[in-house]
Image (cartoon, rainbow, N blue to C red):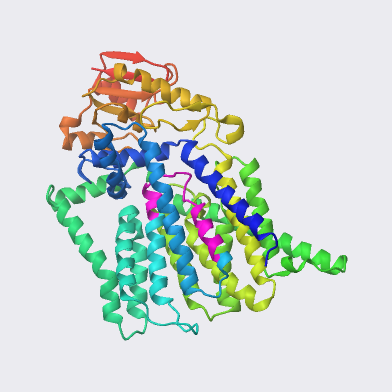
Amino acid sequence: MMKNKKFWKTICVLAIIAYTLKNLLIGTDTDEGYGIMVGYRLAMGDRLLLDMWEPHQTSAIFTALFIGPFVRLTGGVNYLNLFLRVVFFPIQAGVSVFLYKTIRKTAPRVDASVAALMGLLYYVTTPKSVFIPEYSNLHNWFFSLMVLCLLRYFGTKDSEGSRVEGKLGYLVLAGIFMTCDVLAYPSMVLVFLCCMGFLLLRKSKRKVREVLAYALPCVLSAGVMLGYLLTYMTPQIMMQMIGEILGEGSHQTSTADKLLLWFGSLGKVLAILLAALLIAGLIRWIVENKMKKQLPELLRQPGMLFFLIAFVVQIGFWLFSSFNAIYPQLLLMALSLEGIYIYLQKDRSETLFFRWILLVFVNYFAVLLLSNWEPMLLNTYLIMGAEAGVTALSYYWQKTSAYGKKALQVLCLCLVLGNAFGYSYLILGSQEYHASVVRNVRGINRQGLRAGILTDYMTAYRYNNNLEIWQEAVPDGSTVLYVGPSQFFCMFGEHIQASPDTICTMVYDERLLDYWDLHPERYPDVVVFESSYGDIRQEGDNFIWNWLMEEFQPAERKDYPYIAVFTR
């Protein structure tokens, strides 16, 4: 058992408090603005598919549940970003507690302190450095809850440690969470198919009831959603809208280019982990064969030295690389792969953990399919695989050594404190990409959507300046096309959205013309370009600038410090 237990408990509590306060109050990001904007559109009456062409729009169903009441109760969007962060942390904590309790119930050989640290690890790990209920976090919650409910059903044990049939209600809940997960991230239908395949192929006296319990919530909710969409558009229009959404430019990559990106990025991660493994082996060989000594018992646990080296490399990335904030989360990938290795090479007694990890990798592949990010930046989606890996490692180490429990505690402490540091060290969305909190927090967003959130001086200055001039520059009632990644600025006034899509990486192309053909009432009378004292990045020979000059034909241009406004 680790010494100074009270000391380490105190350190963990302080780390969790620091992590929560920093990410509640400091830093902003355009991805976060997109997550809010798409929910705001739905809450304000825009319709799925027909009016909204965002690729993550179905996730907005859940975000809008919080935004709609807030806007109606407060009369606007002041402090909305902060409110959504306040919503986020209790939900994240709730899932963490459920994970802890599920591990204690389904894997009783895992020490209570290790299970608690596993819960804390989940709390301090999010898919992106975004802390509101948007698509990536919603997916993370729903997928995790679905997996945990499956564990509750298939992994329940009696007092003697033998597996017994769980409550069928957990399969129903798993089906409900699966439905929500597909809404949050549509490619998760692959996870649904994987689970259905498992249920259909496994031998069980209750197979029919199990399949119905899991599948019916998914099928019924899909029917309800389809019925709702058909209340305001025909099946033909629906298929046309789906085609427009799938044609979103920033996610359009050829299969060859996508595979090249995947293999190149995954190759980097695996190369780093292989190097850490070789260094660990070399250190052990030198100590035992050249120095004729033994490593400390803690480091003699299979893989422990490798994990610690990978952890040190990860700290190096956080401190010195060009990566922003949390990436590349090497240990989450390492622990997920380690769980598979233990099952295949060391211990096949716990099949449940192996299936758990395989399901996580199906989830990882499904995320890759829809994302325009490289795999190295998506390792955070392996958090549940890492949790399964820790569970498998706990069983294996405690079988092979008296120091297994202590080694797990040390490893989990590194993971928890490391991620609490990684998510807290840098400012999210700073003008300087790799900016530490201590040296760069110099401004505060005074009013509006991001009111009360601290950030670096220039980010706050730009935001506050746009807020001050917005009502003069873009009158209420205007139909506005905003060109740039920060379309959430349109929430500063009461406007009609002229753009079909508010994603921060939007490509401005012929889809705009298709949208206005379908919705002529949304043709803009005001066009706003992001700029810097009159310098517009999009100015030149490209679709949006040519359309502005040749078709929109502005009668007036007004330049402000960070936007340029064109009117007819």
Rendering quarter of residue 291? bottom right
* Residue at horizontal 38 percent and vertical 30 percent from the top: 484
> For the view shown, which residue lies furthest in the front direction?
6
Answer above or below: position of 24 versus 296.
above
- Nearer to the camera, 225 or 418: 418
Pinpoint residue 546: horizontal percent, then vertical percent.
Answer: 31, 24
User: Would residue 194 be seen by someone viewing this image from the given angle?
Assistant: yes
* Residue 94 coordinates in the image, percent (x, y): 42, 57
Find the residue positioned furthest to the right: 291
Q: In the image, is residue 137 part of the stretch drawn in magenta?
A: yes
Q: Is residue 503 visible?
A: no
The residue located at (13%, 48%) in the rendering is: 233
Above or below residue 513? Residue 253 is below
Q: Residue at x 47, y 51 (%)?
A: 126
Q: Quadrant of residue 477?
A: top left
- Quarter occupied by the C terminus: top left
Q: Position of residue 357 (x, y in %)?
A: 48, 67
Residue shown at 69% from the left, 70% from the top: 301
Asked if residue 147 lies left or right of residue 301, the reply is left
Between 261 and 25, which is closer to the camera in this rendering? 25
Query: Horizontally, is 158 left or right of 64 in the view?
Result: right
Q: Give, as a single range, the part of the protein colored magenta.
A: 115-139
Instruction: Answer left or right for 199 relative to 27.
Output: left
Q: Position of residue 550 (x, y in %)?
A: 26, 21
State the count of labels.
0
Quadrant of the drawing holding the N terminus: bottom right
169 is within the stretch colored magenta: no
In the image, is 202 to the left or to the right of 551?
A: right
From the viewer's side, name the closer residue of 268 and 255: 268
Position above or below: 458 against 134: above
